[in-house]
Structure formats: C-alpha cells, structure tokens
Amino acid sequence: MNQNVILNHQELEHKIKRISYQIFETFSDENEIVLAGIASNGFILAEKISSILSSISDLNITLCEVKIDKSNPFNTVTTSISKEVYTNKGIVVIDDVLNSGSTLIYGVKHFLDVPVKKIKTAVLVDRNHKKFPVKVDFKGISFSTSLKEHVHVVFEKNNNYAYLV
C-alpha cells in the first residue's frame, strides 16, 4: 500500500494549535464550552484542542466523546455526557477527516435535541466530497482527493501525521 504524507507531525501540530486559537476567538465571550469529539480520532483531536485551550484561556472545557456508527450514522448517536451537561452551552463537534459529511451532520443533529448557545464544527482535513450541506468552521487543510483515495490521521506519541492512500 502506497502512502503519501500530507501533514507531518510539525504541520499537524501547527494546524491543531491554529484551530484551538480560532475556537478560543469564537467562544471568548463564553465561560464554558463543550468539545464533542467523534470517536475515536475525533475525540483524540478534541483532547489535544482542550489541552491547548486550557493553556491559552480560562474557558471551562467539558470533553465529550460522541459515538456514531460511521457506516450507518442514522443509528443511535450516544455521548459520554448527559444532555443536561451540554444544554445551553457552546459546542464544537470535532472529527479528524470530513469525507461525505454524514458523520458530522448526524453528530451535530444529536446536539439539537436540547437548546444550545452555538454549535461549530472542526476537522483536520476537509476532503471536499460532501454529500450533505456541512460547513466546517475550523479546518486544518482542505484537500481535494479522488473518491477512491482515503485520508488517514495517525495519532502516536510524538509522531502525529496524516497520509493519503
């Protein structure tokens, strides 16, 4: 299998830091926000963003893991926190790669069952193959690929990168 690195460790870390600052700027008028990462890489990304936000702001950050069946996102979506925790809060739904947009749109839909202040979305790589009208508010890179190509994000200790196969 041939793989081409599209973001090396340093570039990926820079993108995460930039996204974190953009989130802070957008939610600077709030006291607390919920970072809702799509399991599993989206949640890892949410943890990394939370760490940076904690160092640059005094926002109270709640991490939330969102579990979605990516092959059938219409199935039940579950979260690691109760609805009461994210009611009337600002929320950022986070995933590593935006392919068709179905995972992200069903993730956002889940949070619309209760009143929220604001919902934004963040991804590291936007592949530009959306089937749903999903706008990404914070993205690391837009990358046009063929439908047969796939983008993978790898989170390893001191070696994070994204590659195309």
Image (tube, rainbow, N blue to C red):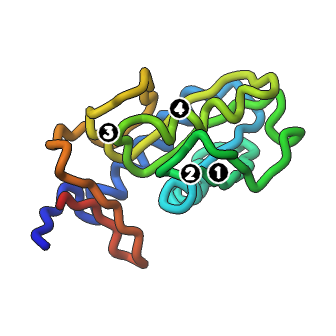
The quarter of the rendered structure image containing the N terminus is: bottom left
Of the numbered discs 1 and 4, the one sitting upstream in the chain is 1
Residue that badge 1 annotates: 66
State how far apart marks 1 and 2 are (Cα): 5 Å
Of the numbered discs 3 and 1, the one sitting upstream in the chain is 1
Of the numbered discs 1 and 2, the one sitting upstream in the chain is 2
Image x and y of residue 35, in percent: 64, 45
Q: Amino acid at mark 1?
A: Val
Residue that badge 4 annotates: 105
Q: Amino acid at mark 2?
A: Ile
Residue that badge 3 annotates: 126
**SS category of the residue bearing label 1:** strand
Of the numbered discs 2 and 4, the one sitting upstream in the chain is 2
- At x 67%, y 23%, the residue is 118
- At x 59%, y 50%, the residue is 68
State how far apart marks 1 and 4 are (Cα): 12 Å
